[in-house]
Image (spheres, grey):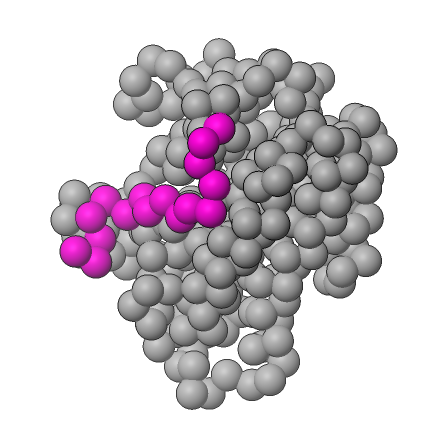
Amino acid sequence: MTQFPSEPGWKPIVPDGSRIFVAGASGGLGHAVIRMLAEGSDCIIGAHYATKVPGVSGENILPIQQKIQSEVDCRNAIDSFVDGVGGIDGLVLLNGALHQSGHWMDVDEDVWNADIAVNLSHPFFLARHAMKHMRKAGTGGRIIFNGTESAHHGGSVHSMPYAMTKLATECMVQGMAREGASDNILVNGVRLGFIKSGFHQRWSGRDDTFMEERAQLVPLKRGGEPWEAAALIVYLLSGYAGFVTGQMYALTGGDWL
């Protein structure tokens, strides 16, 4: 079994036989979530990725390679997993992107629409369709959204459209949690700070110097590790979180204090 750096020696686990779909599995955070689930729990994992293999494999991991560009794509991705394993008990939404590179004052309509689609519309369609399957099965379920702490501070000049979608995501968490409660479908989210998942390098072209300088702005003087975020996500999928719904959990190292 692979040991995460500085791991305390145990992993949160989900109920045996849980069927969990991880959207956006190819990034550093998705990779960490899949590893933690695969190594700590007896569950079935749907690893969704658009263009590249998520970097983990195993008998309990079902790769789902599909680009998501519409509501139909979202439904097909969920249906593919459900058809393959017989149902869905958990959905982790980590798909997201930052398409702009300049000031938000200069963002054109196509880039704006692309950010809204991948960061807000697609997670909504994935979650809604998964909830329909969960409700039909009558066995409850968990849905975990991905947010950002910067949404509460207006984002930066380079990421305001992204931050806006993440603040809207928090509205989605509460609305879907209210809708799902009668069927024991619990909906929560993680509000992430500066996590070393590769997101900044992949979408903003940030180098190591930037990463070090940004980490120094965090009160704990470091970026968060992907496995630290994964542990919170898996906790929200676990039996210990059975009385938690409609909540956003901040994981920021004290950033923005």
On the image, the x and y values in percent for residue 71 come to 76, 60
Badge count: 0
Q: Nearer the viewer, residue 184 or 11?
A: 184
**Is residue 255 within the magenta segment?**
yes
**Residue 222: quarter of image:** top left
Task: Work out whether 159 lies above or below 142.
Answer: below
On the image, the x and y values in percent for residue 75 come to 79, 51
Task: Work out whether 123 lies above or below 59.
Answer: below
Residue at the far right in the pictured view: 83
> Going 71% across and 17% down the picture, which residue do you hit?
59
**Is residue 18 within the magenta segment?**
no
> Going 54% across and 47% down the picture, which residue do you hit?
177
**Residue 143: quarter of image:** top right
Q: Nearer the viewer, residue 172 or 4?
A: 172
Q: Is residue 213 visible?
A: no
Task: Work out whether 245 lies above or below 41.
Answer: below
Q: Is residue 38 visible?
A: yes
On the image, the x and y values in percent for residue 162 come to 47, 67
> Going 47% across and 73% down the picture, which residue do you hit?
161
The rendered magenta stretch, by its main secondary structure, is classed as: loop
Task: Work out whether 99 lies above or below 25.
Answer: below
On the image, the x and y values in percent for residue 218 come to 19, 51
Left of 241 or right of it: where is 7? left
**Residue 232: quarter of image:** top left
Q: Quadrant of the C terminus?
A: bottom left
Range of the magenta residues?
Answer: 242-257
